[in-house]
Image (cartoon, rainbow, N blue to C red):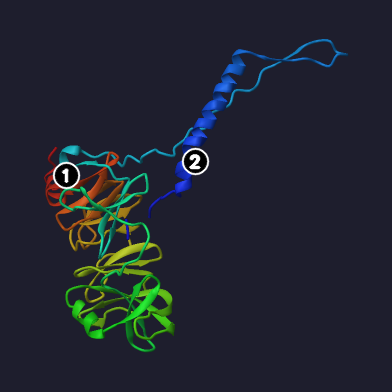
Amino acid sequence: MGNAKKWLPLYAILMVPLFLLSSCSNAGKAANSAASPVIEEAPEDEGIPIEQTEPEMQMPESTFFEEEPGLPVDDNNLLWIVEPTLEYDEIRFFRGVFGFIGYTTDYELYQIDVKTGEALREVPITGGWRTPYDYGYDPKTGTFYYNLEYDYYPEDGDTVIRESMDYVISVHEVEVFSGGGSGSGFNANPFYKAAIYANGKFVSDFIYDEVISGNKIARVRLNAKYAFADNTGELLTDFLFDEVSANSDSNIAVRKDGYWGFVDPSGNELIPYVFVDALSIDADSAFVKHNGKYGILDVAHTISAFRSGSG
């Protein structure tokens, strides 16, 4: 969810040092050649040596490993539970089995402790898992399905109703066309339109490009922008945000105009849009990337600091 990210294929990471080594070698050759001109003998009938100097190779200015710094902010206003020292290239959230996952530049994945930021265990790159509070629905049969590794499995409607009393649920429309039988999944055509399901009923039509479930607030996407909606389906904001974070119905991390900040459910700014990345852990804390490193921000006290104008 989320926070679009720029992951380069593994071969690109491996090729960069070779490219830099080759370029430096060529540049060195060019420099030596400039210091010692190359003498080529002219044809015998001309009889005059011709002095030629090879052009110096211009090393391209690489931005491959440059880290976007974020916007200036008074560090006195930023209060940390864990200082920004965590050695992850990126952190993402997966609702359900794994939670927060830290990626390294070596393409290793680790489940992260939300209190300390420490790696708990390595996570396999391959494999699938079920996402809770996210269902498919075939309107022709009135059947709910959950998705697991490309197959759809029927879900008991009473289970969905019960979950929807505590959560705003994401439901996307599907058309089941094959499969079935004990222990096997169904194939289905997802139509990529989603609806909000809460309190045992659909509270919106299938009109959204994406719905991200939440406790009492859904994040809904339309035409590449996100808004907030409540458990009656009413929009709480306009479609303002480029990305949104889950896990909190207040003090929500959102991205706008390229940077992350924090807003309330009505979209009012609480912490300015200054961060390269931010992921809400809960209403009071978040993983935030600041000066090239992740830390765990004390969101509640940082909001108070900005409101008081301290620092």
Q: Residue at x 37, y 45 (%)?
A: 106
Quarter residue 29 falls in: top right
- Please state the horizontal and vertical placement of residue 38, each as a whole percent of the image: 68, 16
Q: Position of residue 141 (x, y in %)?
A: 36, 89
Which amino acid type is shown beneath numbered disc 2?
Met
Is residue 12 toward the left or the right of residue 117 in the image? right
Residue 4: quadrant of the picture: bottom left
Q: Is residue 189 above or below residue 121?
A: below
Visible residue check, residue 241:
no
- Name the quarter where the N terminus is drawn: bottom left
Visible in this render: residue 218?
Answer: yes
**Dot 1 amino acid type:** Val
Question: What secondary structure is found at the residue carrying circle 1?
Answer: strand
Is 244 left or right of 175, judged from the image as shown? Answer: left
Could you classify mark 2 by the number of other residues whose Cα lies within 10 Å: few (under 14), some (14-19), or many (20 or more)?
few
- At 20% from the left and 77% from the top, the residue drawn is 163
Pick out the residue farthest to the top: 48
Residue annotated with mark 1: 82
Numbered circle sitting on residue 15: 2
